[in-house]
Amino acid sequence: MLKQAILFSATLAVLGGARAQWVDAVHDPVDFVNPLMGTQSTYAISTGNTYPSIALPWGMNFWTPQTGRNGDGWQYTYTADKIRGFKQTHQPSPWMNDFGEFSLMPVNGNEFREEKRASWFSHKAEVVKPYYYSVYLADHDVTTEMTPTERAVRFRFTFPKTDSAHIVIDAYNKGSYIKIIPGENKIVGYTTRNSGGVAANFRNYFVIVFDQPFTSRRAWKDSTLTDSLELTDPHVGAFVGFDAARRGTVINAKVASSFISLEQAERNLATEIGSDDFATVEAKGRAVWNKTLARVSVEGGTIDQVRTFYSCLYRMLFFPMRLYEKDASGRIVHYSPYNGKVEPGYMFSGTGFWDTFRALYPFLNLMYPSINKEMQEGLVNDFKEGGWLPEWSDPGYRDVMIGNNSASVVADAYLKGLRGYDINTLWQALVKDASAEGPDAAGRKGVGYYNSLGYVPYDVHINENAARTLEYAYDDFCIYRLGKALGRPASELEPYARRSQNYRNLFDPSHKLMRGRNQDGSFATPFSPFKWGDAFTEGNSWHYSWSVFHDVQGLIDLMGGKKEFVKMLDSVFVMPPVFDDSYYGEVIHEIREMQIAGMGQYAHGNQPIQHMLYLYDYAGEPWKGQYWIREAMRKLYQATPDGYCGDEDNGQTSAWYVFSALGFYSVCPGTDQYVLGTPLFRKAVLHLENGKDFVISAPNNSAANLYVQSALLNGQAYTRNFLLHSEMMKGGQFTLNMGASPNTTKGVNAADAPYSFSTDKMK
C-alpha cells in the first residue's frame, strides 16, 4: 500500500561543514516518526529497549509484531528475522514484561505451533507508522496489515491462492479460554497471563470478528489440535481456515478487548470500530497522531533532528496507558488490579515514577494537562482501592525500584495549575506513604531509620540506602511545597521541610560526594565512587551525588562554592569510564552503556544523572551546560533502531531530548521553573492547551552556534537561567541570539540562578 509521502519544505544548508537537509516547516509530524527507534536492543546492551507500538496516544491496548517467543520481554527486536505473531501488548519494559497478551498469526499451511508458524520477514517489506503496520511474511506469502483504536484494532490479511489459508489465535499460557462461533465468524476468549500486580480474578477478554466464514475451525491446547470449538486450559487457542481460491484474497478481522467482560469487549468493538472499514480506521488514527504531535511544532533544523524530535515525542505519549473503559451507560469504569472489582472512574498503568517524575510528567503538565488530570484521578483510585500510591504500576503494585516519587508526580501537577480532582485524598495518600513501608515498593522502605537518623543506614540490610535517602529528601520537599499550596498548618509542614535537608547527612567532604553511612554515624567503608549499586540505584556516587534537585545551592555550598562545584561537574566528563560491578556480579547494561558512550562517567542511559548538565546554570557558568547538552543530543539520540543510549523508560529518556531540544528542562519538579539550556531548532511553538502559544525563536541557531549570547522575553532583556511555568502559560515570545563562542557574562549573577531551597526567602 502506498503511504503518503513526508511533506516538508526543505533547503540545503551547510551545518558544521556537512550538507544536511534543512526542514523549514512540518505539515504532518506523524510522518517524521520512526517507531523502530530503540528496537535494536538486547539483554546485554540497550539502545532503547522499545518495540514498535502501533497504537493511539495513551491507548488501553498497543499492538506489535512479535519476533520473540511467547513470554519473552524482548518481544520485537530489530535484528530478528522471523515473526511469530501480531500481539496485543501492555508491556512498559522488557524488564517488567507483559500482561493480558494474546496474538493473531496468518499461516499458509497447517501449522499452528509457535515455533513452526514463524515466518521470515525483511525490514525492506515492512511499513511502520504509529497508526499503521504492514509486513510481508515470506514463508506464508501473506501480507499482514493492522491499524488501531484505543481498545480495538483492524487487521487485513492478504493471502495467495491456497487451500491452506489459516489464522492462528494464541491466548497464551498460564490460563486461557477460547470459543469459536462459526455462525457469527467470531472467536471469543480470554487470557490470564500476567507478570504480577493483578488480582486473582484478572482476565483480558477478547472478541475477534472476521468478514469471511470459516472453512475449518478447531481449538487447540498446548501442541495438540482438537475437534472442540471451546476449551479452557493452561494454554489454548484457535485455528480457523478460510477460502483463498484466488491470489490476493483478503480476510479482514476486527478485534477488541476488555479487562471487565466479554460483553464489554463487544461494546468496545462496536463503539470504536463499528462499521468503519480499514481505511477509515487508519485515517482516523493518522489524524489523532497528527493532532497530538502537532501540539509542539518545530522548524529550522535538519531532517534527522526533526525525525528524532517527533520520534521521541511519540514515545512520550503512551505511558501510563489507559485502563478504563465506558460501560453501557457511557460511564467511565475500570477493572481494579488491586481488589478485582469493576470500579467507577479512571485508572492508568505502566509507569515507574523513579523514571518518569523527572521530565515525562512535567511535560504532560506543560503540554497535555488534561490527560494528566485524568491520571491524577487515577491515582486517587489507586489509593482508594489499594491503600497506597503505586511507585511502579503494571498494572497494580510492582516491587521494582526505589523512592517515594509519587510525591513529585502529585505535587508538580497541582503546583503547575491542574485542578478539578480530589487533591485532598492525594494529600492524605502522600502523608501516609511518607510515614510507612507499603507493599511492593509503595511507601518508604527504611522510613523509621530515615525519620530518626536522617538517613537510611548502609548496614541495616536495606539495599540502595543512600539513593533512598536522597530521593526521600526531595520527596519531602515536594510534600512540603504541596502542603503550603494547600494551606496546611506550618506545624504539619515543618518535618517535611526539615527532612528535605537530609541529603546533607550523606555528604562526605573528603570526597565531595555522597556516600553510604552506617547506623552509628560512620561512613561505610571501603568506599569506591565508581561502585555501581550497593548504596546507590543503577549508578555510582558520581551519578547520584547530584540528586539534590530542590537545593542545588545547598550542594554547591557543601562542595566548597561555585568554582569547586563546577570542577566536580567537569570531572564527570574527563574521568575514564571505569567501574566496579561487584555488587551485581556482572556488567549490567547500564554500565556498558556508560562505558561505550565516550563521555567519561556521564551515564545518560539511566535517569539519575540526566539533569546534571543543567546544574552549570546554578553555578553561574551556563555555557558549559550548553556545550554538553548539545553534545548529548548530537551523540546519544538518533531516529534509528539503535537510537537511544540506554533504556527509553516509558517516555523519560525521550522527554529529556524533547525538553532539551526546546531549550529548557525540568530539573526540579515541584517548582515553577524550567532551567535553560540551548535550543536545537531555529523556531519552536508550544501550542498550549489553554489556547495560547509560547514561541521559542533562535533565528541564527546552528550546529556551530550553540551558545546563547542574549535573550529577550516578550521583547525585554532576559538574563535569568530559568523560565517560569506561570509566565509561559500566558503565551509569549522567547527570543535567543545564538553564537559560536560562549558568552561568559550572561547568567552569572546570583539572581540569575534557578530555585534552591537554601535561598528560598519564602519558605
Image (cartoon, rainbow, N blue to C red):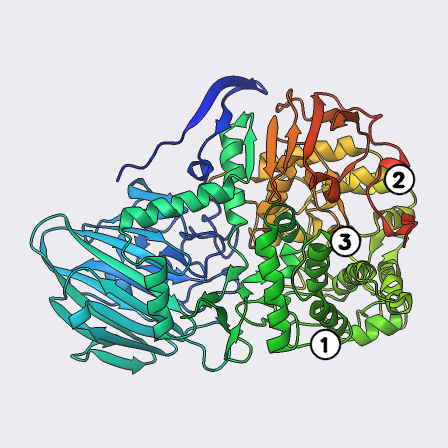
Q: Secondary structure at mark 2?
A: helix
Q: Is residue 575 left or right of residue 321?
A: right
Task: State which tag comes first along the sequence, 2 or 3.
Answer: 3
Q: Which residue in the structure is indicated by mark 1?
A: 437
Mark 2 packing: few (<14 Cα in 10 Å), some, or many (20+)? some
- The residue pinned by badge 3 equals 547
In space, the residues marked 2 and 3 are separated at their CA atoms by 17 Å
Q: Position of residue 241 (x, y in %)?
A: 15, 64
CA gap, disc 2 to disc 1?
38 Å
Q: Quadrant of the C terminus?
A: bottom right
Check whether the beta carbons of the residues at disc 2 and disc 3 lie within 8 A of each other. no
Q: Secondary structure at mark 3?
A: loop
Q: Residue at x 65, y 70 (%)?
A: 389
Please state which amino acid type lies under the numbered disc 3. Answer: Ser
Relative horizontal placement of residue 453, taking residue 152 as reference (left or right): right
Which residue is painted at 54% across and 66% down in the image?
A: 346
**What amino acid is labelled 1 in the image?**
Glu
Q: Earlier in the sequence, mark 2 or mark 1?
A: 1
Q: Would residue 236 be visible to someone looking at this image? A: yes
Residue type indicated by callout 2: Lys
Give the x, y percent position of residue 345. Answer: 54, 69
**Mark 1, secondary structure of its residue:** loop
Between 707 and 722, the one nearer to me in the picture: 722
| Cβ–Cβ under 8 Å for marks 3 and 1 | no
Q: CA distance from mark 3 to mark 1?
A: 22 Å
Residue found at x 31% / y 62%: 255
Q: Which mark is residue 562?
A: 2
Quadrant of residue 100 within the rendered picture: bottom left
